[in-house]
Image (cartoon, helix red, strand yellow):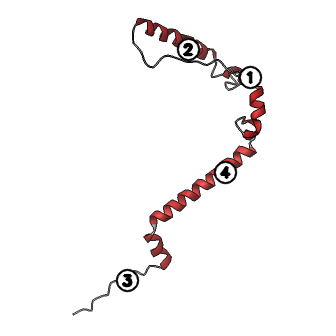
Amino acid sequence: MPEEIPEVVKIETVPIKHAKDHKLLILVFASVGISLLMVVFSMFLYINTGASQLDLSRPGYVDIRTQNGDKPERFDGFEATGELNKESLNEFSKLYETKLKEIEQVNAFSSDPLSPKSLRIE
């Protein structure tokens, strides 16, 4: 009778076995680590690109915010509740046409569609 060949015994190293036992914990720590790296990188870009100098919401710029007293007119829009009748439809159409004309005045294919003049923030 031929000799039986013994099965190959898998020998796992201790770190691999330990990693297999704690998959969820490793996933959580890896996710937190990746998110921290992304935050550090985004803050690096925020500071080095000059975007932080434009951010008036920062606490150091409270005085500058209060000096800028020009508040844009607020567009209240169309009421979300109420009766739906001919008057309300006419009001909606009038508001829609007004905003549509404002939007059509901006040339999206111009050389500078994001200029302050195009965005009406002058």
Residue under the image location 24 percent in, 92 percent down: 2
> What is the crowding at mark 2: few (fewer than 14 residues within 10 Å), some, or many (at least 20)?
few
Mark 3 sits on what residue? 9
Residue visible at 72% across and 34% down in the picture: 56
CA neighbours of label 4 inside 10 A, class few (<14), some (14 to 19), many (20+): few
Q: Is residue 22 above or below residue 109?
A: below
Q: Residue at x 50, y 16 (%)?
A: 78
**Which amino acid is tagged 3?**
Val
Q: CA distance from mark 4 to mark 3?
A: 46 Å
Indicate which disc, 1 or 3, sits on the residue closer to the N terminus.
Answer: 3
Q: Nearer the viewer, residue 107 or 37?
A: 37
For mark 4, what is the residue? 41
Q: At numbered mark 3, what does the secondary structure look like: helix, strand or loop?
A: loop
Element class at badge 2: helix
The mark lying in front, picked from 2 and 3, is 2
- Mark 4 or mark 3, which is nearer to you? 4
Label 2 and label 4: CA atoms lie apart by: 40 Å
